[in-house]
Amino acid sequence: MNLLTATKIAGSGLQVQKLRLNVAATNIANADVTRTAEGGPYRAKDVVVRAVPLSEKEPFLKKVEVAAIVDDPAPFKEVYDPGHPDADKRGIVKYPNVDIITEMVELLSAGRAYEANLTVLSSTKSMVNRTIDLLRT
């Protein structure tokens, strides 16, 4: 594997992890939204990631990309609160299906994966610089 290939793979990882961080942050920010523009409570989102070959010449080398951002199929949380403006006739309010603990784990996981990809890029840069220094002497 050449250094440019390592950079492409790590770069694709950075893009995916950035999106995972943004989606998890959006889910947390909307954890209490009971009324959206589409109607009903906010539905948590999940990022679907897939590995794709970097090129036809090297099908064993894979980069990652976002396949889709999908709605979490988990049911909404139902809370009895008859005074709430979004309560139904039984006094039940549907809250988003966002699990804060799961989203925090997602933030930590994506953050660490992002850092790992940055480390790969930093190491690659160091190797390129060292190679240039060796070629100069």
Image (cartoon, rainbow, N blue to C red):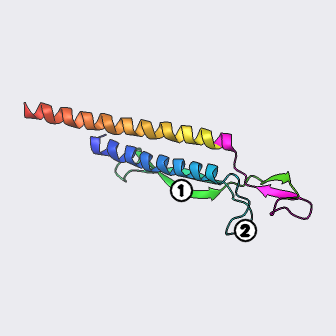
- Residue 79, position in %: x, y? 84, 52
Screen quadrant of the N terminus: top left
Amino acid found under the numbered disc labelled 2: Gly
Q: Name the residue rendered at 58%, 57% in the picture.
A: 69
Q: Earlier in the sequence, mark 1 or mark 2?
A: 2
The residue tagged with tag 2: helix, strand or loop? loop
In contact (CB < 8 Å): disc 1 and disc 2? no
Extreme-right residue of the structure: 90
Kindly state the secondary structure of the residue where label 1 is placed. Answer: strand
- Circle 2 sits on which residue? 39
Task: Judge by depth and name the residue closer to the eye, 94 or 130.
Answer: 94
* CA separation in Å, label 1 and label 2: 26 Å
Please, what is the dominant secondary structure of the magenta stretch?
A: loop
For the point 58% across and 48% down, the residue is 24
Q: Disc 1 residue type? A: Ala
Q: Position of residue 84 (x, y in %)?
A: 82, 59
The residue that appears at 56% across and 58% down in the rendered structure is 68
* Residue beneath the point at 80% across and 57% down: 94
Residue range corresponding to the magenta coloring: 84-102
In the depicted structure, whether residue 59 falls above or below residue 115? below
- Please identify the residue farthest to the left as the structure is shown: 137
| Foreground residue among 104 and 136 | 104
Say if the magenta span includes residue 57.
no
